[in-house]
Image: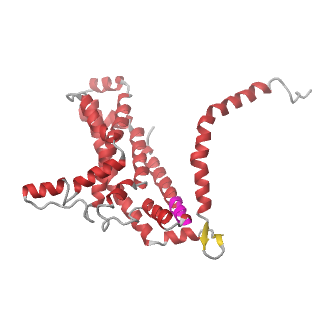
Amino acid sequence: MKKRPASSPLRAPVVRRRLTGWAFILPFAIPFLLAVVAPTVYTAGLSLFQERLIGGVTFVGLDNYKEQLGDPRFWDGVTHVVIFLVIQVPLMMGLALGAALALDSARLYAPAVFRLGIFLPYAVPGVVASLLWGYIYGAQYGMVGDLKEFFGIALPDPLSSGLILPAISNIGVWLYVGYNMLVLYAALKAIPAELFEAAKLDGAGTWHTITGIKLPAIRGALVITTIFSVIGGFQLFNEPNILRSMVPNVISTDFTPNMHAYTLSFAGQQYNSAATVAMIMGLVTAVVAFAVQRRGMKGAV
């Protein structure tokens, strides 16, 4: 049997198809490598070294990780983030789902105004929103203070140590409930009309239609928006950092892990320790997001 020459014409189409495939993914692969992979590798490498007065930059292995995991300031920040997530994510997703279902019901008067009114806060930058709500919360100079003075009643201070996390969570809900609503509403509009017609013929009511058709159909969208909300919660920085100037005794420079890393890097020039905090939180965020995805899609077809 004769062997086919290495330069067989049949290899040309295969090579061309491979090159075409690489050409299609390059517009994504290049920015991904430059903006995600390269900074992650650099940060991981930075976390394995330590700059010392004597000896300069020294390889310390996992010593930075042991130091940060043993630092109570880091765990205080993690605790604040967890409480923030427990408050914000269920409330925000519940409001977004309710608003999306209300829009999809076609029973609202002026639905376009309703949709725009809920989505509009998402167009406000996070820094501006934090300043806005900070002045609303003010017990001495804001709306809370004005209501106390006008009605002559005692109102709780949203910027107190016991209410600061719910106050920050409220800002997050106000900002992002409209975005999640639109994602869920788009998923609802993609449900085939035949399913609703079949449910109507079977005598299904509104509640049974929601629980039997709509919610199972948008399960993927619910999981995705929840994952994005969890990831955003672990990145909490703008809101407490802005409010800190108003209540420095309540919000410390280490109030969240991101604020802790920022303080280590820009106030203490401890870049290796800051990189370590970033790597730990990146790993925690990835694990939690993966767990949410697995739990959310469990049993889905």
Please state, as top left, top right, bottom left or bottom right, where the N terminus lies in the image: top right
The stretch in magenta equals 272-279
Coordinates of residue 6 in the picture (x, y in percent): 87, 30
- Residue 275 is covered by the magenta coloring: yes
Residue 208 appears in the rendering: no
Q: Residue at the spot x=7%, y=55% of the render?
A: 151
The quarter of the displayed image where residue 100 is located: top left
Q: Quadrant of residue 111?
A: top left
Query: Would you say residue 154 is visible in this rendering?
Result: yes
Query: Residue 235 in the image: x percent, y percent?
Result: 43, 54
Residue 229 position in % (x across, y down): 39, 48
* Residue 298, placed above or below residue 44: above
Q: Is residue 172 magenta?
A: no
Q: Residue placed at 23% from the left, 56% from the top? A: 137
Answer left or right for 72 relative to 100. right
Does residue 91 lie above or below 84 as drawn? above
